[in-house]
Image: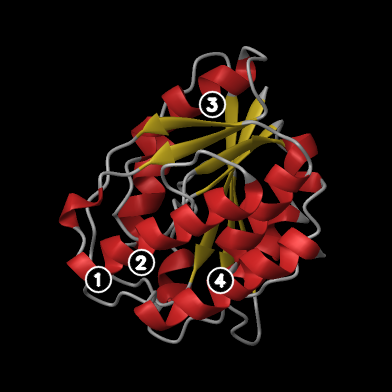
Amino acid sequence: MKLSVIMPVYNEVGTISEILQRVSDVQLPNMDKEIVLVDDCSKDGTHEILKQQGHIPNLRIFSHAINGGKGAAIQTALQNVTGDIVIVQDADLEYDPNDFVRLVAPIVKGETKVVYGVRNLGSQKWFMAFGNKLVTFITNVLYGAKLQDMETCYKAMANEVAAGLNLECRRFDVEAEITAKILRRGYKITEMPIKYVARYEHKKLSPLDGWPTLKALLKYRFK
């Protein structure tokens, strides 16, 4: 089996080398791994650093000529994955790739098709933690789910699930779209606790992204 790690990247000059190495270092029992990275028109020198990553095995890099957003980068990556399981990895250092082993295990065993990593939001500023909990609550109400963390980056899924998403959202509202479409298609989302430390330097997500997220949840509930 193979794990495809999707990595959308935009202006991460300070962390990109380290996160690529961390992902590369993860050892998955009886499983190969590829990294499908999409540089979403970075302007801070990230592109130049990516040219120096030839030592990272099974790394494939795609570039956008115009910045499209996280959702657009994920869409490009999904068109190019070759793995049996797909997971999204942010290019900062908030998440620990060592959690891959636990997250993919239930999918490998055939116990589920989708696994979400649940964060402890204690390191987030109160308004960000409140926003995360609010959109998760609204997701549960709209879709009859019992999720603990809808906005988590770590969404692992079988390729057949990922291939059927047909994503439209181009920015951070893609998290809501992914979850909405998975739930609408009747898949059970298994959740597991993961390591997480919030960062605020060069943070791109803001409270203003909450409104597009809510609109996406409503759109895909009734579409």
User: Local crowd at mark 4 within 10 Å, few (<14), some, or many (≥20)?
Assistant: some
* Distance from Cα at disc 4 to Cα at disc 2: 11 Å
Seen at 63% across and 15% down, the residue is 111
Q: Which residue is mark 1?
A: 127
Looking at the rendered structure, the kind of residue marked 2 is Gly
- The first of marks 4 and 2 along the sequence is 2
Q: Which residue is mark 4?
A: 214
User: Local crowd at mark 1 within 10 Å, few (<14), some, or many (≥20)?
Assistant: few
* Distance from Cα at disc 1 to Cα at disc 4: 16 Å
Q: Secondary structure at mark 4?
A: helix
Q: Is residue 31 above or below residue 8?
A: above
Q: Secondary structure at mark 2?
A: helix
Q: Which residue is mark 2?
A: 131
User: Local crowd at mark 3 within 10 Å, few (<14), some, or many (≥20)?
Assistant: many
* Distance from Cα at disc 2 to Cα at disc 1: 6 Å
Q: Nearer the viewer, residue 56 or 183?
A: 183
* Distance from Cα at disc 4 to Cα at disc 3: 28 Å
Please provide percent x and percent y for residue 41.
55, 82
Which is in the foreground here, disc 2 or disc 3? 2
Looking at the rendered structure, the kind of residue marked 3 is Val
Q: Are marks 2 and 1 in contact (CB under 8 Å)?
A: yes
Residue 96's image quarter?
Answer: top left
Q: Which residue is mark 3?
A: 104
User: Local crowd at mark 2 within 10 Å, few (<14), some, or many (≥20)?
Assistant: some
Please provide percent x and percent y for residue 112.
64, 22
Q: Is residue 106 above or below residue 214?
A: above
